[in-house]
Image (cartoon, grey):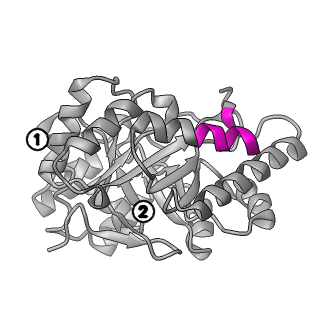
Amino acid sequence: MPSAASGFPLSNGVKIPCIGLGTWQIPDNQELVRHIHKAVEIGYRHIDTAHIYGNERSVGEAVRTCGMPRDKIFVTSKLWNADRGYKETLAAFDTTLKTLGLDYLDLFLIHWPAARGEAMTWQSINSGTWRAMEEIYESGRVRSIGVSNFLIHHLVPLLARARIAPMVNQLEFHPGYMQAPTVEFCQSRGIQVEAWSPLGRGALIHHPLLSEIGAKYGVTGAQVALRWALQHGAIVLPKSMNAERLKQNTELFGFSISSEDMAAIDAMPQTAFSGLDPDHVTF
């Protein structure tokens, strides 16, 4: 029976668990350490953090003390916008690794394309950033590299200059916000899509259509949303501090959504969009 630890192979052969634990907005304290320990006990083997979340210290402590061998836990962190650039990226990665207290990362992402202003400027900054990411990858201190919130017009100039293509693109992806052109672009080029906010920051948990479909399969609307993303080939990164929901978010393999129900979910109007357009965010 597949589980939360079941993985998708990245373009370099590294296997990434298809369900990860999101940690955005969870404070850097012992409660987070205990929360990750509980998640690992439930079956999570993929933890997602970022420098800007401010909780890398607790994530690293939890990974080191959870009772699982380090190579059984997939750890992701992300480079913040202010740290983009070749030298800045190298230094920021060192800081992240030190804060986590780990010898290596499993995945390191450029958090945002930071694409405001003159295109040549942000493209050049991202190119230098990516050159540093490639060097970190080749050093063996990270097993895979990628981007987050990059749309097609951000990816094309990056790919044109890259020696190594991004292995992952982490996007806002959920029922009511599919970003289909970008997802299709990534999948056609072997870039694995990860879904952040796969439950629309909780707004989809009680959505009528998802709840109605869930009733047919004996599952919750939230489980339908997560299963829908998996069936579209996306890794999901749900976040919950509730132990029961934490468990439910991994129980996605005892049912399969029919093509008719998938199409009905695909046809949902824009719903639960965060408002975070990569071209217009001001951070």
Q: Which residues fall within the magenta stretch?
A: 83-93
User: Of label 2 and label 1, which has the lower sequence position?
Assistant: 2
Q: Is residue 166 above or below residue 1?
A: above
Residue 234 marker: 2
248 sits left or right of 166 in the view:
left
Q: Which mark is residue 244?
A: 1
Q: Residue at x 41, y 34 (%)?
A: 56
Q: Is residue 94 above or below residue 142?
A: above
Check residue 86 for magenta coloring. yes
Left-right relation of 103 to 40? right
Residue at screen point 51% across, 34% down: 51
Q: Residue at x 38, y 27 (%)?
A: 25
Instruction: Choose top left, top right, bottom left or bottom right for residue 122.
Output: top right
Where disc 1 sits, the SS reads helix
Query: Residue 36: x and y, percent?
Result: 23, 40
Amino acid type, callout 1: Glu
Q: Is residue 5 visible?
A: yes
Q: CA distance from mark 2 to mark 1?
A: 23 Å
Q: Main secondary structure of the magenta part?
A: helix
Work out whether 33 lies above or below 6. Answer: above
The residue carrying pointer 2 sits among few (fewer than 14), some (14 to 19) or many (20 or more) residues within 10 Å by Cα, namely many
